[in-house]
Image (cartoon, grey):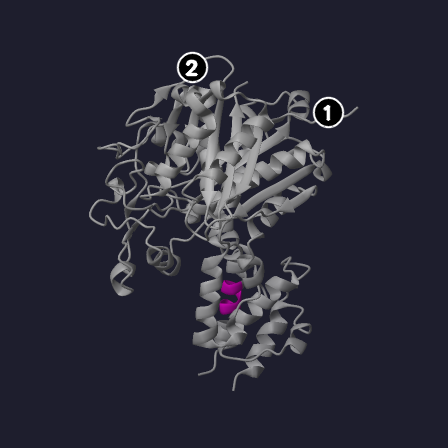
Amino acid sequence: MAYTEQEILAGLAEIVSEETGLPTDSVLPEKSFTDDLDIDSLSMMTIVTLAEEKFDVRIPDDEVKNLATVGDAVTYITGAQS
Amino acid sequence: MSTVPEVVVTGLGATTPLGGDVPSTWRAALAGESGARPMDNDWATTYEIGVNFAAQLRVPPSEVLPRPEIKRMDPSSQYAIIAAREAWADAGAPEVDGDRLGSVVSSGIGGIWTTLDGWDTLREKGGRRVLPMTVPMLMPNSATAYVSLELGARAGAHAVVSACATGAEAIGYAADMIRAGRADIVVAGGTEAVIHPMPIAAFAASRTLSTRNDDPAGASRPYDVDRDGFVIGEGAGVVVLESAAHAAARGARVYARLAGVGLSADGYHITSPDPSGGGQVRAMRSALADAGVAARDVVHVNAHATSTVVGDLIEARSIREALGDEADHAVLSATKSMTGHLLGGAGALETIFTVLALHDRLAPPTINVANPDPELVLDLVRDTPRALPAGQVAAVNNSFGFGGHNVALVVTSV
């Protein structure tokens, strides 16, 4: 079953919040992972790994550098769902 | 001409089966409380381990640390960072030059929870599900690295590993860093988090654990004729060591001097102590010589004394041999009777007990000794604390580990 964009955003917010301690409602589509949420490359890979599991998708390493914002990740995961 | 700096203890921190910090742990130790409790899980029966109790932390890290820190650190590092924060605050959180500040916070075993969780994930879900933080969480230098990061300690972040002597050896190494002029102040100690069925099964297999399942609080009984092995524990102890000149310049409160370090190896057996006690005697004698302390000035010994059948008596005889007839003037405490055996954390916590014993002039008790072994050749402090004499006196903390590691630290009063 496919997740809606809203569900993906909510799920990502939970993962990011667990990783960073930021409140889930601060994880908004326009936020940049590095500039706004202060997420380093190790944390980013953790978030990717947890997101792959949660949404049952594959996010290749080459794609991760294109995911600048939370919205980018939501869009990618939405499209990657079979 | 340069002189060797004197090393003093200016900060203490711990999280233990007796309490979430040093004051509560020390109060419980003086009161003769046991930290051993039945485990709130069914490992013992599920896995046929045969041991269903342990000395678990009194205050879980989840009550102290924010969630992201819990996720980024193996429990062994969580315990260390809790103890290090207390020790640093206790030392007055001094403004220091990071290039002259070091960290030596070690673990005997390292991040075994992370290692085993990663293996479970790999087998159940595949390699892509293993989290990238796994390596920095499982590596045995993780705790000292986190302490170094937190405090900006850049004179060196070391992890010395010597099984159950780890915590004491870390403190000895830290003292040597200061005496060698490589740092002015070093945060040092030990940590362990192995209350997990696999390591408990492994220790049980080596027949070193007590199986007194019907009486956890009475299971650790060093020097009692009915001792049957140690109680596995968890936790961390961390001290702040400082050159006496550095401490004086900032007006720091000084608990005691860390005056002597003695290290030796048995070269005898991978798990059994040398029955002659030769390695232990050499460690104690070299620590006393290093401190410039005569045997007659030693008023207190915190024994390694894990409550194993042979180990405790070998140590007692070694202490008598190292101190000679002057051993009559020293009292012996075996605090693992209360804390259980914190493995890599043990030597650090017991150094803290030794420092506080001299500072408060009170030797902590040894509990559960209903029938002292008739072969015990020392004056054991039982049930209630014993007053220590006033004046310039010294105490010894012993820590020994699988692999034949022997560490003796000499602490002197200020």
Q: Position of residue B325 (x, y in %)?
A: 42, 21
Residue type (three-letter) at the residue carrying disc 2: Pro
Magenta residues span A9-15
Q: Is residue B305 visible?
A: no
Check if mark 1 and mark 2 are on a common chain: yes
Q: Which residue is mark 2?
A: B389
Q: Position of residue B192 (x, y in %)?
A: 46, 48
Q: Specify which label sits upstream in the sequence, 1 or 2.
A: 1
Chain letter for mark 2, please.
B
Q: Nearer the viewer, residue B106 or B76?
A: B106
Q: Is residue B128 magenta?
A: no
Residue type (three-letter) at the residue carrying disc 1: Thr
Residue B211, disc: none
Q: Residues within 10 Å of mark 1 (few under 14, many from 20)?
A: few
Helix, strand or loop: magenta stretch:
helix
Residue reaching furthest right? B1
**Residue B375 image-quadrant placement:** top left
**Residue B101 image-quadrant placement:** top right
The residue shown at (37%, 42%) is B311
The secondary element bearing badge 2 is classed as: loop
